[in-house]
Image (cartoon, rainbow, N blue to C red):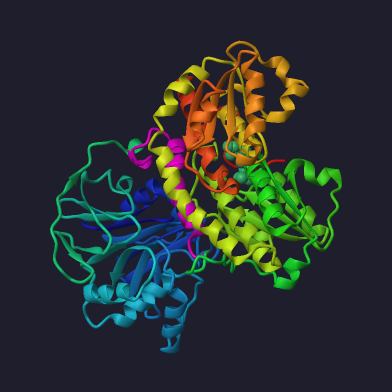
Amino acid sequence: MCGIVGYIGNRDSKEVLIEGLKKLEYRGYDSAGIAVFTNNGLEIRKSKGRIAMLEDKLKSEPIEGTVGIGHTRWATHGKPSDVNSHPHTDNSSKFSVVHNGIVENYLDLKDELGAKGHVFVSETDTEVISHLIADEYDGDIVSAVQRAVKRMRGAYALGVLTEYEPTKLVAVRFASPLVIGIGENENFIGSDIPAILEYTRNVYILNDGEMAVLTRSGVELMTTSGDIISKEIFHVDWDLVTAEKAGFDHFMLKEIHEQPKAYRDTMLGRISDDGKSVELKEIGMTTEQIRGISRIHIVACGTAFHAGLVGKTVIESLARIPVETDVASEYRYRSPIITPDTLVIVVSQSGETADTLAALREAKRNGARVLAITNVVGSSVARDADDVITTWAGPEIAVASTKGYSSQLIAFYLLGLYLAQERGTVEEAKVAEIVAAMNKLPDQVESILEQANVFKGVAESMSKHDNLFFIGRGLDFAVAQEGSLKLKEISYIHSEAYAAGELKHGTLALIEDGVPVIALVTQEDLYEKTLSNIKEVKARGAHVLGVANAGYEGEVMKSVDEVFSIPRTLPLLTPALSVVPLQLLSYYASLARGNDVDKPRNLAKSVTVE
Ligand code: F6R
């Protein structure tokens, strides 16, 4: 996920581009750049780091011109660096491209163009696009772009300039968002409306396979096959703050709703076409090395630690390797037994958590191989680990992690299956069954989200209490711990998560009339045992909300006060669904208490101190 902007008009384009990029920084912020037509031709300034770094560069190396394109990057192909930053260009430096998306066949195209003499300087897929357009160019930039995109597979929103036709800015979209802003004697492009809202409220929203040719005086719309089209102008009547949140009241709610996409993106390209195997090309271990792993330590903090609890069960049950999950801040101090055949898996959404980084370094010092699961390409954790599985959840802004956690679960499912395949501990048919069920998860999450409002009422009554409990067995207990943390951190309601069978060993003393208990009952083999534990709290006056699999809600309802059903999936995969109602409950409870949902007190998104 990156952000792109473009401007053609009479203003100083760099001002418009920089302002637009700042509005898009939520889409990624590991590097930024702009390309502008100046008196010397097409000039590019780009820099690793936040947009402020680019602004500094522009002070020492100014450029001026009234046509330009800009980009803020969230690295996918190639680490964050000056050279991997956009805009990219071709060998003649006559073409410049900004891109949001992933070109899946870029390596094939790169080989082909390389054979024709094109020389590449970056590791990115985008650089290939600028060379491809240059290669296709025969005097008309519009048809060159059309021919180029026909050869590309994947997702793209592009802004393209060429020095040969300095009165045109070409924009094209497939599977990545792109809007065109219509002004007076000036026109704009942006990944999203906020990027251009300061200048115009009239926009065209491009669909897949559509493109726009912008000049100062107008915008021509067409398909990538060259058919001219007309579109209605969309008049934006909301303000900037709402726009950045894509219409949601808070980033957290937006990110909860982005989970189906995060699941799809994290699985994309990692499952074979026939759905019978998992392909994790990013793991550099040989089959022999994987077979030689004697134990796994999963190390992480907070929510990522909770994902690691699920990861333990997933890996143990599929790959039959003993796994311990540790809180990173404790790991180093308990002198863990780390041998060269120990695989240490560190999990970190931000990739910058100091405790997790310190644990990673300790593991490496002791000779372990370290695999990172992180959401941020080029983060410290990603750089220091031997292997990296990136979760493609996109930038997470709300302090409370939601899509970060659930995409970590997807990473663990993929990893568990991959290790199991390599070690020969699962049959192909079993892999196919799990993969098929995983493919259904995004739609199943959508179906839960469609009922999001159901949680408002429950959360409002919960918000009147100062204490509550989450209970569950097995994987339900792991998810209960995440549900409890989420509720505490944003609603400030004290809650505890308990293994349902453990309550009677002490905690039951805290249950009295009206105490809310959220009971997860999704593990069908533990179903009857959990129902017995629910009856124990009911008998002491608790008000119980059950989360149960579809088809079981009637039976569960006999033991609880309210029940919410989640779509049926394989027992191992239920955490990827059952966490969603808990996220929504926390969100609405926080809202009901009038808290700052996205920025809860005392907390920070990235914890870089030990
Ligand atoms: C809770 C939350 C934190 C983080 C923890 C680790 O919602 O977000 O508990 O999970 O601080 O952060 P990362 O995953 O960035 O290492």
Determine whether, in the image, residue 241 is placed left or right of residue 203: right
Picture quarter with the N terminus? bottom left
Q: What's the residue at 60%, 28% (across, down)?
A: 602
Would you say the magenta stretch is mainly helix, strand or loop? helix
Q: What's the residue at 65%, 50% (across, down)?
A: 347
Q: What's the residue at 48%, 61% (across, down)?
A: 268
Picture quarter with the C terminus? top right
Res 444 → quadrant: top left
Q: Quadrant of ligand 1?
A: top right
Determine whether, in the image, residue 344 is placed left or right of residue 537: right
Determine whether, in the image, residue 579 is placed left or right of residue 285: left
Q: Which residues are magenta?
A: 243-270
Residue at the far bottom in the pictured view: 116
Residue 602 position (above or below residue 382): above
Res 166 → quadrant: bottom left
Residue 580 image position (x, y, % from top left): 50, 38
Residue 278 image position (x, y, % from top left): 57, 65
- Residue 377 versus residue 80: which sits nearer the camera? 377
Residue 248 in magenta stretch: yes
Residue 281 position (above or below residue 306): below
Residue 408 in magenta stretch: no
Residue 140 position (above or below residue 57): below
Q: What's the residue at 33%, 38% (across, down)?
A: 247
Determine whether, in the image, residue 407 is placed left or right of residue 328: left
In this rendering, the count of numbered labels is 0
Residue 400 image position (x, y, % from top left): 54, 36
| Residue 598 at least partly seen | no
- Residue 496 versus residue 105: which sits nearer the camera? 496
| Residue 478 at least partly seen | yes
Residue 184 image position (x, y, % from top left): 15, 51
Residue at the far top in the pictured view: 513
- Residue 153 versus residue 63: which sits nearer the camera? 153
